[in-house]
Amino acid sequence: MFFRVVGESFARNPRRKLLMAAALVLGMAVATATLTVVLDVGDRLAREFRSLGANLLVTPQSDTLPLEIGGVDYRPVDEGAYLPESELGKLRTIFWRLNIVGFSPFLEVPVEFPVPQSGTRPATVSRPTLIGTWFEHNVPVPDGTTFTTGVRITHPWWRVSGRWPADGARECVVGVALAQRLGVKLGDTLALRARGADFSLQVNGVLSTGGPEDEAVVAPLGVAQSLAGRPGQFRRLLVSSLTKPEDEFARRDPAAMTPVEYDRWYCTPYISSIAYQIREVLPGVEARAIRRVAESEGHILTRVSGLMWLVTLAALLAATLAVGAASATTVLERSSEVGLMKALGASGWTISFFFMAEQILIAIVGGVIGFGLGVLLARFLGQSVFGVPPALRLILLPVILVMAALVALLGSLLPLRRAARLQPAPILRGE
């Protein structure tokens, strides 16, 4: 009897049912697309933001007061503390090791080389800074694997006209401003002097960064360690990591947290918790966030996610109003049927149950079709914004079906309440 009544309802009012289903399909399609993008946007934007540079700076905890101008350390080589290069593989053993995109150690060495006489310009001695770092280096990890990292990963905006130096080779790239000022070009040999010793490097390329490196010579870390007399050591480390935007909880002092709060903080990829874990595996270091980069990422991620959630709520509200309007019209058209059912002894709950069953069936059909359309819309949005479509998340299908059922029931709540209050006698008399 139940299926017969419901089936005849669909057969007698197909347009009304199609209108309600269309509203649910559109609402669920938008909800599916925005939820897919919201679940994917954090990782996508975080990876895009890595082009802004590293977001963590690691230095020796016992170091002297740094003297940095434009990101270059101008302290004498013999002053300040140093960190061992051999310990860097431990960064891939922290809890959030997969969030470590890359890291690059740096060692600055003041050098000098003669500038030959050119025309009316007399011979001089230039004293630039030689910056030693990794370009593309394989780091051994304690678990037996290797991790490839370097400035080509942590500083993707660095551009080289020529080629990058090879690890361990006596090669370098020269900053574009320094190369133009001194007339250095690709293929030249730089005769350097550092700490009283002569050294020569082959110029493999001209480096353009828009930063202080444009006035420096950048060479493999081993070259800088040899010139500085600091084998296997470096002075500062830049780490690029995928993080979650900080909130008030993330800014709390871990020492003042309860065990449950501490576990929650430790197991969340806040930049503060990742810095804490770095200090755990590298004793004697100070790891701090580069706030300008981290805060910019947090603000943008929060606003994009908030916008997506706002669009989702707007789509669900529009679908609820459309379903409510269609349900109200359906109740008015079927008031005589409701009156007859009540006259035959049906209760208000029974009548509401029949209407709710119709809404649930429409919600299931609309939710499935809307999910399919939403996946296509999400792929279009992902391809347009990030150049890569988001991953298909089948876990969203039951969520969308539940949301469709809730939208259908909420939209029908007032019409069903009105149907339950109808009196059979006036309706059957045609009043």
Image (cartoon, helix red, strand yellow):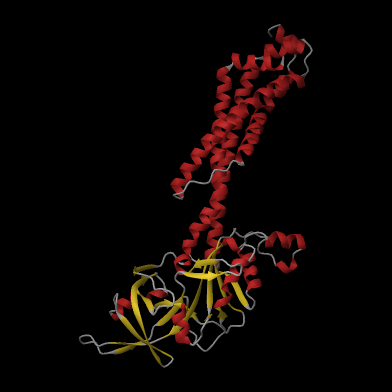
In this rendering, position of residue 105 left or right of residue 164: right
Query: Residue 152: horizontal and vertical position, in percent?
Result: 44, 67
* Residue 139, above or below 384: below
**Front-most of residues 132 and 118:** 132
Residue placed most toward the observer, 291 or 51 = 51
User: Residue extending furthest top?
Assistant: 429
- Up the image or down, 263 lies above or below 13; here it is below
Q: Position of residue 162 (x, y in %)?
A: 33, 69
Q: Residue at x 53, y 57 (%)?
A: 46
Q: Splitting the image into 4 quarters, where does residue 219 fall?
A: bottom left
Residue 97 location, quadrant: bottom right
Residue 167, quarter of the rendered image: bottom left
In the picture, measured across the screen, residue 57 lies left or right of residue 253, that is left
* Residue 140 horizontal/vertical position (percent): 55, 70
Percent x, y of residue 238: 52, 71
Q: Is residue 96 visible?
A: yes
Relative to residue 137, is residue 409 drawn left or right? right
Quadrant where the C terminus is found in the figure:
top right
Q: What residue occupies the far front of the structure in this picture?
A: 144
